Image (cartoon, coloured by chain):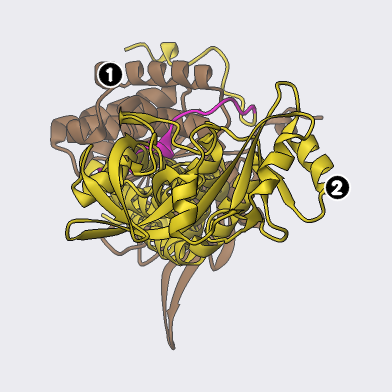
Amino acid sequence: MTAATRQKPPPLVLESVSKVFRSGASEVRAVSEVDAEVREGEIVAIVGPSGSGKTTLLSMAGGLLMPTFGRVLVLGEDLYRLGHRQRAAFRLRHIGFVFQAFNLLPSLDVRENVEIALNLAGVTRAAAHRRAGSLLELLQLQHRASLRPGNLSGGEQQRLAIARALANRPELILADEPTASLDSQAGHRVMELMRLAVEAGEASSLVVVTHDVRILDLAHRVLYVEDGRLRPAD
Amino acid sequence: MNPQTAGSPQAPHPGTAGPAKVPFARRSLVNDRVRLAISVGALAFAVLLVLLLRAIMDGTVRKSTSYIDNVGADVFVAMPGVTNMTLAVSTLPEEAVGQLAAQPGVAQAGGIVRLNAVVGAGDETRPGILIGYDPEQRLGGPWHITAGAGVEGPGDAVLDTVLADELGVELGDTIFVAGGEFEVAGLSTGTASIAGKAVFVQLHRAQELLQLTGIVSFVLLRLDPGVGAPAFASSLAATQQELEVMSRETLSGNDRTLLSRLFIQPVNVMSTVGFLVGLAIVGLTMYTTTSERLHDFGVLKAIGAPNGFLFRTVIVQALYLGSVGFAVGLAAVVGSGPLIVRAVPDIGVHISMSSAITVLASVLGMSLAGAIAPVVRILGVDPLVVFKR
């Protein structure tokens, strides 16, 4: 066995991925023939105008939207060859999501919002409690652990969303406009924490869909989407 | 910040399921406390409706046999074919009392005349049960006199206190029963039921008024210590074909069964109504609670929660709602029981274990039925809702 074959598969590979939305006789090609690879330790920013297909691309990369054509490989696993249940389990263990709207669970407190992701993955109660505590410390939310998300500032809510995304040490974090709802200071802090999390090995890679030009400085690579097609940014 | 400090030394191991963890189902349900309180209250009302009806039926039926249960007889003897005391007419020759008293194992025997009768005092009249007994035998008369004395003379009567209140009479007042005039010599308790309120008089006076001279309705037997009533009753019945011989438990059971049959249909109708009301409440609550939390379920789906978790969440919520609603409803029945009996002394309120278990099972069943629509809705949630801004 050579060193190359022993190498871990990349966190994300998109192979000729396309998405066509059909409505009656009309059809819209939201994403067209996209090829891309995200390597371990890499932070990739995807930019582009509104309606260019960024979020559709992210949805397909995260196993939430089946491409019309092409393959999505996460850690070498063809996501859409997995059954619905297996894909959900795979997502839970290997992919973390950070959304613009935070999408926290308002009935749970801060710590529980992190613990639930661990619980769902089958981590024991004690281990989940420890891991959640560590992540809250990492994201400087330990003093807010017993509050409900509604009592947090926007920046704190997004840090909590990051903590949840990191909970199971995913190989791939997909973030959709994570700073769009935050002021510049909070947005910068959030991005800095995400970068540090990748560097610390809490997640292997990060793909960020954004309009925020400040994020581009933190990314190792910037890709540009226009009319559903992906190309390296100028 | 030191990122290296984050987490346990080893990565979490998926698949090693532990005990119950973040109580998402409960937290999600109690998040809106006002809605929860309304739902629990409405469900408790449905439980109250169903359980109280059954409790009243059971309590009233039990109370209707209080004479049989408390009069002090171990065995009751009636004419052949008569297996009830309530709603039944029995006639036996009075000589049977002496013959039965001579049976081995019998400590005491007493004949009674028992018939429904109208009791009047002044302008008031009420239905009652005239019981004639022989005070010398000390068997067949009131067992708990709260005021006055027993029946000492042919013109004396002991009245149930509830009946006395209804008629507005006190000790020393005059009442009329079956065309005879009596003075209220005593008041008894525990002798009122849906079947009627007792008026105790001397046996021979009752026979005279009812033109039943030489006739008794039932013969009551108290057995010697150590003599088992069921065995004695079987043995006596085998030798005395012209008599119906029953232990206290048998006669009491027969009467309760008879009265239950009279009540059961309307109670079942009302129980069904209560069940349907409860089902609608649980279904509506679960549906609205779920609808308001659809986004949360979408988020959970997006991060990888299996459908089984979402399914369990709704089921747990439904069972939680059903259990709390049942507990509150049960408490309401327990609390309201004494008030009901005080207001309507004829009836009783008794929550039997079997009724409570049946209603609990029904409530949990309707909770699960009410969860079907929410489960279907949740399973159809598109996880892409997470990208809506």
Residues at marks 2 and 1, CA–CA distance in whole angstroms: 89 Å
x then y, percent, for residue B72 = 56, 32
Based on the picture, tell me whether residue B17 belongs to the magenta stretch.
yes
Q: Residue at x 54, y 68 (%)?
A: A68
Q: Colour of chain B?
A: yellow
Left or right of B90? Residue B125 is left
* Label 2: which secondary element: helix
Viewer-nearest residue: B186 or A1: B186
| Rendered position, B215 above or below B109 | below
Which residue type carries mark 2?
Answer: Ala
Mark number for residue A140? 1
Q: Which chain is brown?
A: A
Tell me, yes or no, whether the two marked residues, 2 and 1, touch with CB atoms within 8 Å. no
Instruction: Locate the N terminus of chain B by quadrant.
Output: top left
What residue occupies the far bottom of the structure in this picture? A25
Residue B327: image quadrant is: top left
Image location (x, y in percent) of residue A158: 27, 35
Quadrant in the rendering for residue A104? top left
Drawn side of residue B65 relative to residue B25, left or right = right
Residue at image coords 84%, 40%: B235
- In terms of depth relative to the viewer, which is nearer, B19 or A102? B19
Tell me if residue B36 can be seen. Answer: no
Query: Which residue is at a point 73% across and 27% down the rendered structure image?
Result: A3
The label nearer to you, 2 versus 1, is 2
Residue B146 lies left or right of residue B225; in this view the side is left
- Residue identifier under label 2: B238
**Image mark 1: chain:** A
Q: Which residues are magenta?
A: B16-32
- How busy is the neighbourhood of tag 2: few (under 14 within 10 Å), some, or many (20 plus)? few
